[in-house]
Amino acid sequence: MGQAPPLDPRRARLPRRVGLVPLRDRLGEYAGPEKGDLTGPNPVDRGKYGSKIHLITERTGLPLSVGISGANLHDSQALIPLVKGIPPIRSRRGPRRRRPAKLHADKGYDYDHLRRWLRGRGIRHRIARKGIETSKRLGRHRWTIERTMSWLAGCRRLHRRYERKAEHFLAFTSIACTLICYRRLVC
């Protein structure tokens, strides 16, 4: 049994600490595993909410194909629909091109089935291998994608997703890509 609660809630007081509060009690708490905890990363982080924007750009950073997916979907699952979504590009001579000559990708796309699929379409690929190659060499090609993503992040509507439907968010992303192409080609 315990004590009966006081009748007047204004009179109920918690015991106070005398002196300064140690820093580790206030700010030292964090949401990761403790120093002695060997359980690894938080399993809740695997099912993240939100959405990701996937892009294929040309060498100068103009977006060719754009797609969105859930934040918990692996990046490698978006490569095939993006490559298939590249529109025909008019060239000065000959037929319209529908496929890139070369594709650069990071370690998230290092799967044999993706390499076979790209090879079957006649696309040369440069994909960093997990555990073998560093992704630093891809930095000289990947910065164009990162720059285009930062241009997209400059659009307030895309910085944080307000739309409930994925079609609406994809439409705003497509409008932003159109504006990027317009600004790059006109100026």
Image (tube, rainbow, N blue to C red):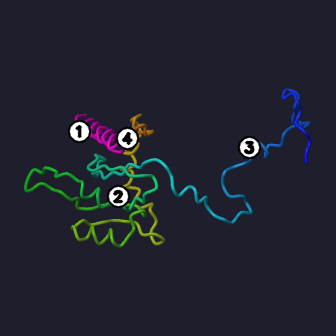
Residue 125 in the magenta stretch? The answer is no
In the image, the segment drawn in magenta is 164-187
Residue bearing the label numbered 3: 27
**Vertical placement of residue 60 versus 132, above or below:** above
Residue bearing the label numbered 1: 185
| Residues at marks 1 and 2, CA–CA distance in whole angstroms | 27 Å
Pointer 3 and pointer 4: residues touching (CB < 8 Å)? Answer: no
Q: Amino acid at mark 3?
A: Leu
**Nearer the N terminus, badge 3 or badge 2?**
3
Residue 174 in the magenta stretch? The answer is yes
**Vertical placement of residue 4 versus 139, above or below:** above
Pointer 1 and pointer 2: residues touching (CB < 8 Å)? Answer: no
- Which numbered disc covers residue 83? none
**Nearer the N terminus, badge 1 or badge 4?**
4
Residue bearing the label numbered 4: 152
Q: Residues within 10 Å of mark 4 (few under 14, many from 20)?
A: many
Q: Residues within 10 Å of mark 2 (few under 14, many from 20)?
A: some
Q: Secondary structure at mark 1?
A: helix
Is 166 placed left or right of 136 in the picture?
left
Q: Residue at x 37, y 41 (%)?
A: 152
| Residues at marks 3 and 2, CA–CA distance in whole angstroms | 40 Å
Is 76 placed left or right of 98 in the picture?
right
Residue bearing the label numbered 2: 78
Q: Secondary structure at mark 4?
A: helix
Q: Which one is nearer the viewer's eye here, 83 or 129? A: 83
Q: Residue at x 66, y 65 (%)?
A: 39
| Residues at marks 3 and 1, CA–CA distance in whole angstroms | 50 Å
Pointer 3 and pointer 1: residues touching (CB < 8 Å)? Answer: no
**Nearer the N terminus, badge 1 or badge 2?**
2
